[in-house]
């Protein structure tokens, strides 16, 4: 398992984070991104004006790496707004480590939304103890079927 150094987001991380976020979405849902995706500058605006403003954002880099983030999580209280792992680091236990970290921040409950078409994310959350509690439609501009997942401490 890859060892991580988890730290709070710093403005110096912005470019690496916006690229990580974009390529992770493009790789996991290429057809969805072609139809519903946004221009890169729009993604950067949303990251800067919403995700970074509305949440506490944590990044992690490999202990033996070059200092660039390989994963980030945006969390507000018990709500995970975003959790993205760079595709070069998928299936190495990094996402699980970040969920473990999130559980230290909110030890009783975590919840999140993901798109219903994101079968890999859905399997990941189920594998990590989350259960689907509601199905609905994501807000505009996507307005696509989504699912709410929740993890409760036992």
Image (cartoon, rainbow, N blue to C red):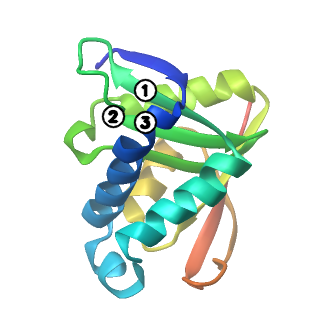
| Mark 3 surroundings within 10 Å by alpha-carbon count, few (fewer than 14), some (14 through 19), many (20 or more) | some
Q: Secondary structure at mark 1?
A: strand
> Is residue 46 placed above or below 94 in the rendered structure?
below
Task: Quarter of the image for the N terminus: give it.
Answer: top left
Task: Quarter of the image for the C terminus: give it.
Answer: top right
- Place of residue 100 in the rendered image (x, y in percent of width and height, measured from the top left): 56, 25
Residue 99 shows in this picture = yes
Q: Decide which of 44, 59 is in the foreground and name it.
A: 44
Q: What residue is shown at x 34% (from left), y 76% (from top)?
A: 33
Q: Earlier in the sequence, mark 2 or mark 1?
A: 1
> Is residue 118 placed above or below 85 in the rendered structure?
below
- Place of residue 108 in the rendered image (x, y in percent of width and height, measured from the top left): 79, 30
Q: What residue is shown at x 52% (from left), y 70% (from top)?
A: 115
**Disc 2/disc 1 C-alpha distance (Å):** 6 Å
What number is the disc on residue 70?
A: 2
Q: Are marks 2 and 1 in contact (CB under 8 Å)?
A: yes
Q: Decide which of 136, 76 is in the foreground and name it.
A: 76
- Place of residue 130 in the rendered image (x, y in percent of width and height, measured from the top left): 61, 46
Q: Secondary structure at mark 2?
A: loop
Closer to the camera: disc 2 or disc 3? 3
Question: On the rendered structure, is 72 left or right of 35?
Answer: right
Instruction: Give the residue number, with chain letter if any, for mark 3.
Output: 13
Q: What residue is shown at x 72% (from left), y 50% (from top)?
A: 54
Q: Secondary structure at mark 3?
A: helix
Picture quadrant of residue 151:
top right
What number is the disc on residue 60?
A: 1
């Amino acid at each position: 398992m890859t060892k991580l150094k988890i730290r709070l987001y710093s403005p110096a991380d912005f470019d690496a984070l916006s690229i990580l976020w974009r390529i992770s979405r493009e790789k996991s849902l290429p057809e969805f991104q072609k139809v519903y995706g946004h221009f890169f500058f729009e993604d950067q605006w949303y990251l800067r004006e919403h995700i970074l403003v509305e949440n506490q954002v944590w990044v992690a880099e490999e202990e033996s790496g070059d200092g660039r983030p390989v994963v980030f999580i945006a969390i507000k209280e018990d709500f995970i707004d975003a959790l993205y792992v760079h595709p070069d680091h998928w299936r190495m236990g990094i996402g699980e480590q970040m969920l473990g970290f999130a559980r230290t921040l909110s030890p009783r409950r975590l919840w999140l939304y993901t798109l219903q078409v994101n079968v890999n994310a859905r399997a990941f959350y189920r594998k990590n103890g989350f259960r689907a509690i509601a199905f609905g439609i994501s807000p505009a501009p996507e307005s696509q079927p989504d699912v709410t997942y929740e993890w409760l401490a036992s």
